[in-house]
Amino acid sequence: MKHSTLMDTDDLEPIIKPKEIDFDTLSIEELKDYIKELNAEIKRAENYISSKEKDRLNAESLFKK
């Protein structure tokens, strides 16, 4: 494993913990809607990761020149 003396900016970002939901209080439709919302949020996070990876690669290529 490669260790770097520089801190990754990702380490500075707070970890957001989702609120707990009592599934017993939700109907089947509400649970399905909840899953759709979570899937949309996962996709949004994946897109953001891709964007950050592209930014990192662009910055690395810039400084290698």
Image (cartoon, rainbow, N blue to C red):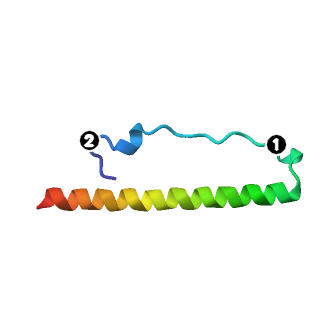
- Horizontally, residue 28 falls left or right of residue 12, namely right
Q: Are marks 1 and 2 in contact (CB under 8 Å)?
A: no
- Mark 2 or mark 1, which is nearer the start of the sequence? 2
**What amino acid does circle 1 point to?**
Asp
Image coords of residue 37 (percent x, y): 68, 56
Q: Which residue is mark 2?
A: 6
Q: Position of residue 62 (x, y in %)?
A: 17, 59
Q: Secondary structure at mark 2?
A: loop
Task: Write the residue at 35% across / 43% down.
Answer: 9
Three-letter code for the amino acid on which mark 2 is drawn = Leu
Left or right: residue 40 versus residue 13 is: right
Tell me how far mark 1 sits from mark 2, CA to CA.
41 Å
* Residue for point 23% across, 56% down: 59
Quarter of the image with the C terminus in it: bottom left
Could you say where residue 8 lies in the image, as x and y percent from the top left? 33, 44
**Crowd band around label 1 with a 10 angstrom C-alpha radius: few (<14), some (14–19), many (20+):** few
Residue drawn at 56 percent across, 62 percent down: 43
Mark 1 lies on a secondary structure that is: loop
The residue depicted at 70 percent of the width and 61 percent of the height is 36
Compared across the picture, whether 26 is left or right of 16 comes to right
Which residue is more in the foreground, 39 or 10? 39
Please state which of the two labelled residues, at mark 1 or mark 2, is closer to the viewer: 1
Residue, disc 1:
22
Viewer-proximal residue, 32 or 64? 32
